[in-house]
Image: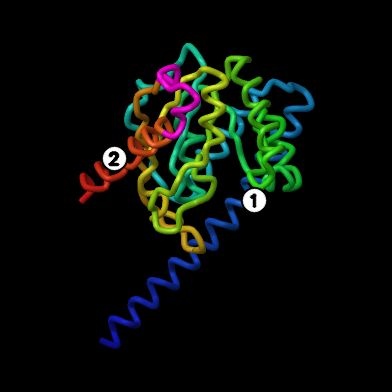
Amino acid sequence: MQYQNTSAEEDSGKLMVRSLGVLTIGVMATAIYSLYAVLSACFSPREERIHQIARNWARTLLRIAGVRVQVIGQENVLMDGPQIFMSNHQSDFDIFAVLGHIPGEFRWIAKEELFRVPVFGHAMKAAGYIPIDRKNHAKAMESIAKAVEKIKENRSVMSFPEGTRSVDGTIGPFKPGMFLLAMQAGVPIVPVTIIGANRVWPKRSLNIKPGKIVIVIDKPIDVSNYPLEKRNALIEEVRHIIIQNQVKYIREER
């Protein structure tokens, strides 16, 4: 019994050391890519160029952490027009997995605190990403208006409608703002389910484990079938699809 406890402690110690190494290298890589994005924006301010740098950054962080990503349903991404991707949110690695592996161009709607980070925040602005303050309704509506303009420019949008990461992987209630955006812009919603990211890096943990993340991209939902008074029905349909895919692929893994 004492030997088993010692072995478990050694494994825990090795994981902690590995995680600190991943975090340290990840922070350094983030600083380098952020600076590269800001400098690139000075000479070539095209958002597509900066978004590609962000995509390379995300893939680099996944490789550093030893994380593989499998994408199911890539054929459901609309390549000839804008859409709004809506995904569950389990871990910071959701961002890297989605950014690095969902095909096509899109712009993030992200919490405004990220835009205050030196250099990194400037890089996000240069990529055309949109800050949102969910605690301030007026500012949130301004962000939605900006997102509508992006969609009018034929750019897709990515969001996490839960508004925060789940502690245990359970999918929480969805906030209505992004659904209002879809209805105002008249663009389809593409449900995205992320499985496994919370095992790689759980919320409130410093331990980062190598592993596999599965992304399931479901068929687009035509929002024109939902008048504004049926917004809640649309929210529940998208959430139900994401939950179903999560349950299905977790069962298959077992």
Magenta: main secondary structure equals helix
Crowdedness near tag 1: few (<14), some (14–19) or many (≥20) residues, C-alpha within 10 Å: few
Image coordinates for residue 48, horizontal then vertical, percent: 62, 22
Q: Which residue is depicted at the point 41% across and 72% down? A: 12
Q: Quadrant of residue 9?
A: bottom left
Q: Residue at x 66, y 39 (%)?
A: 132
| Distance CA(mark 2)–CA(mark 1) | 38 Å
Q: Label 2 amino acid?
A: Gln
Image location of residue 224, percent across then percent down: 44, 17
Residue 240, by quadrant, is top left
Amino acid identity at mark 1: Met
Disc 2: which residue: 244
Which label's residue is closer to the chain start, 2 or 1?
1
- Label 1 SS: helix
In which quadrant of the rendered image does the N terminus lie? bottom left
Q: Which residues are magenta?
A: 222-232
Residue under pointer 1: 28
Residue 31 in view here: no
User: Of helix, strand and loop, which one carries label 2?
Assistant: helix
The nearer-to-camera label among 2 and 1 is: 2
In the displayed structure, 55 sits above or below 221; it is below
Residue shown at 41% from the left, 57% from the top: 209
